[in-house]
Amino acid sequence: MATQITRNAKYSAAEWQARQELAACYRIFALRGWDEMIYNHITVKVPDEDGTYLINPFGMHYNEITASSLIKIDSHGNKLDLDNPWHVNAAGLVQHTLFHNNVPGAHAIIHAHTTATMAVCSLEAGLLPTNFYAASFVGKLGWHDFEGVTVREEEGQRLLENLGDHQVLMLRNHGAVVVGKTLPEAFHIFFILQRACEVQVSTMAMGKPAMIPREVTDAHNRDTAKMRVGGGRGQLEFDAMIRQVDKIDRSWRD
């Protein structure tokens, strides 16, 4: 991702890069219509520090978020940017710090309440192998039963167990959580998941969907993996979306 030549002197180069990348992601979500007013969260680990993460200011819309307005928290959810007047939503602290602290390679975490992902999370059968995008998730989803708003730490162990070694946890009756080794990777996984759910919702509204056989989904995933190029999963897609955001408003870089 191309960043500004100059940066805010308050932050290290690595943290400023992470801040700009995360701010861009929030703007991309707003552009795609995946935002939920001031709610939900996308978080990343600060690359050159142990146990510190960046999260959105509670009360700020996704299309207002900038690199410098993001809040840095520690592994317990304590706010470290004491000069930042914004607060952090408790629902984001418990779930995101849990996965960042306990899941190997959890650099970026996305939790969103899009209509399509919530609809599929609320469907007893869940995500079905009925379309091109859904084929990517066969055998790759964890499921967690709804226990109410995620603010109680005692739910944490069950969340971890249900995520297992997957990168996606479908929260029944709630929404999806995506864990990525990089933010572009997490973004790309979420994009594919969102499209899978959108197409399933549309298909089921028309009638009985046609299922894709397991041997076909296995071949699909094998061949898709061979096609990835360009600096890691999701990087080309993420950079393309940043260019779209920049055409509208470049204030996220500040």
Image (cartoon, rainbow, N blue to C red):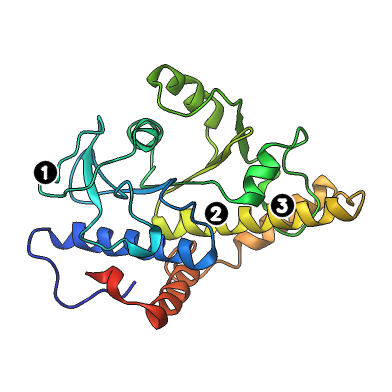
Q: Is residue 62 above or below residue 49?
A: below
Give the mark, 2 or 1, whose residue is nearer the N terminus.
1
In this image, 208 relative to 161: left or right? right
Q: Position of residue 156 (x, y in %)?
A: 43, 23
Q: Which residue was labeled with disc 3?
A: 134
Taking the spot 81% from the left edge, 52% from the top edge, the residue there is 130
Give the mark, 1 or 3, whose residue is nearer the N terminus.
1
In this image, 119 relative to 57: left or right? right
Q: Nearer the viewer, mark 2 or mark 1?
A: 1
Q: Are marks 2 and 3 in contact (CB under 8 Å)?
A: no
Point out which mark residue 126 bears: none
- Label 3: which secondary element: helix
Give the mark, 2 or 3, whose residue is nearer the N terminus.
3
Q: Position of residue 246 (x, y in %)?
A: 37, 79
Q: Which residue was labeled with disc 2?
A: 190
Taking the spot 61% from the left edge, 25% from the top edge, the residue there is 145
- Label 1: which secondary element: loop
Q: Which residue was labeled with disc 1?
A: 82
Q: Is residue 85 above or below residue 21?
A: above
Find the distance from the CA under tag 2 to the CA under tag 1: 32 Å
Q: Which amino acid is tagged 1?
A: Leu
Q: Are marks 1 and 3 in contact (CB under 8 Å)?
A: no
Q: Which amino acid is tagged 2?
A: Phe
Q: Which amino acid is tagged 3?
A: Ala
Q: Quadrant of residue 3?
A: bottom left
